[in-house]
Each structure stands twice: as C-alpha cells, then as structure tokens.
Amino acid sequence: MPAPVSARAMKIIETAIVQKANDEAATLRAESAAIRAAAEERAREVERLEAEFNAVAADLAKRLGLKDQPTGGWLGRLFRRTK
C-alpha cells in the first residue's frame, strides 16, 4: 500500500497541475491569436487580389465595348456558381 501523501505535498502537486494547465492555456491562446491574425491577413490579400482582378477585367470589358458590369464583380461572374 502506498504511503499517504501529506496535505503540504498535495498542495504542491495541485499547484503544479494548475500552473501547467495555465501555461498550456496561455500557449493555446497565443497560437489561436496567431492563426486568427494569419487568416485575417490572407482574407485581406484575397480581397485585394479580387479587387485588382475586377479592376483589370472591367478595364478590358470597357475596351471591348461591354457596358454592364456584373453584380459582385467579374471574378464572381466568371468563377462562382449561381444557384
């Protein structure tokens, strides 16, 4: 039978477990913030590229004599499915 653990030893063990959990939680919060920031940056880049594409496509359409631009931009008209 194992020897009983003193109250002081139990308190030290509990404190260590709580500290480890807090450290892991802080790491997860930092990682999730980094992932969220990277995703937001990618979304901004996609929006910038889409706007750039739409501007070039609109200029081309204008040169070709097309008067109406599609709702949602040219990229959406060319590549997105309509329901």
Image (tube, rainbow, N blue to C red):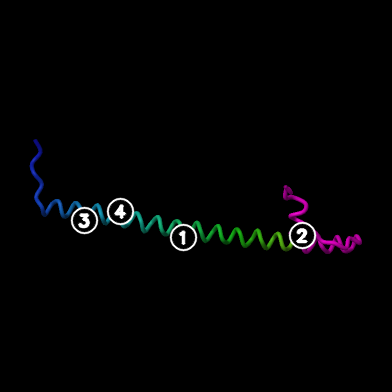
Looking at the rendered structure, which numbered label has been put on residue 21? 4
Residue name at image x 77 percent, y 64 percent: 55
Residue located beneath label 3 in the image: 15
Residue type (three-letter) at the residue carrying disc 2:
Thr
Dot 1 falls on a residue whose secondary structure is helix
Contact between marks 3 and 1 (CB within 8 A): the answer is no
Dot 3 falls on a residue whose secondary structure is helix
What is the spatial separation of the Cα atoms under label 4 and label 3, in whole angstroms?
A: 10 Å
For marks 2 and 4, give the one nearer the viewer: 2
Which mark sits nearer the N-terminus, 3 or 2?
3
Q: Position of residue 69 (x, y in %)?
A: 82, 61
Q: Position of residue 37 (x, y in %)?
A: 52, 61
Residue type (three-letter) at the residue carrying disc 4:
Ala
Which mark sits nearer the N-terminus, 3 or 1?
3
What is the spatial separation of the Cα atoms under label 2 and label 4, in whole angstroms?
A: 51 Å
Look at the image and say whether residue 60 sits in the magenta stretch.
yes
Which mark sits nearer the N-terminus, 4 or 3?
3
Looking at the rendered structure, which numbered label has been put on residue 71? 2
Looking at the rendered structure, which numbered label has been put on residue 33? 1
Q: Position of residue 52 (x, y in %)?
A: 73, 63
What is the spatial separation of the Cα atoms under label 3 and label 2, in whole angstroms?
A: 60 Å
For marks 3 and 2, give the one nearer the viewer: 2
Residue name at image x 44 percent, y 56 percent: 31
Label 4: few (<14), some or many (≥20) within 10 Å?
A: few
Residue name at image x 16 percent, y 54 percent: 11
- Over which residues does the magenta segment extend? 55-83
Looking at the rendered structure, which numbered label has been put on residue 1? none
